[in-house]
Amino acid sequence: MGATHFLMKTLAHVRTEMSLHVLAYNLKRVINIIGLKALIEGIGFVSSQ
């Protein structure tokens, strides 16, 4: 994942930091597999314009 160490010190903070790394990794995979437009449509995000 590119992270060789954690910036935070305590277990709770490291756990949160790792969760953010995993979330970012999974979002990148989804965007590469189905595309950004399909992801936005799938989430149901609609601009109010």
Image: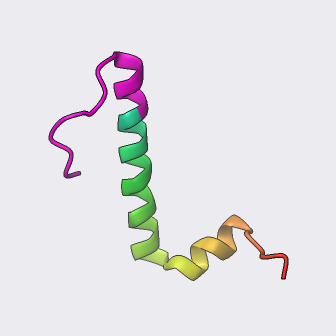
Q: How is the image coloured?
A: rainbow
**Does residue 41 appear to the left or right of 7 in the view shown?**
right
Taking the spot 74% from the left edge, 68% from the top edge, the residue there is 44
Asked if residue 25 is positioned above or below residue 28 in the image, the reply reads above
Magenta includes 20?
no
Give how far across and how far down residue 35 sits, in percent: 49, 79
Q: Residue at x 21, y 45 (%)?
A: 3
Which one is in front, 21 or 48? 48
**Residue at 43 percent of width and 31 percent of height:** 16
Closer to the camera in the image, 43 or 20: 20
The residue lying furthest to the left in this view is 4
Give the total number of marks visible in the rendering: 0
Tell me which residue sits at (31%, 27%) in the image. 8
Magenta span covers which residues? 1-16
Q: Quadrant of residue 17?
A: top left
Residue 18 occupies which quadrant of the picture? top left
In the rendered view, does 3 fall on the left or right side of 23? left
| Quadrant (top left, top right, bottom left, bottom right) of the C terminus | bottom right
Residue 26 lies, with reference to residue 16, above or below; the image says below
- Tell me where residue 30 appears, x and y as whole percent: 46, 67
Q: Is residue 35 left or right of residue 40?
A: left
| Image location of residue 41, percent across then percent down | 68, 75
Query: Residue 13, relative to residue 5: is it above or below?
Result: above
Magenta segment main secondary structure: loop
On the image, the x and y values in percent for residue 36 come to 52, 77
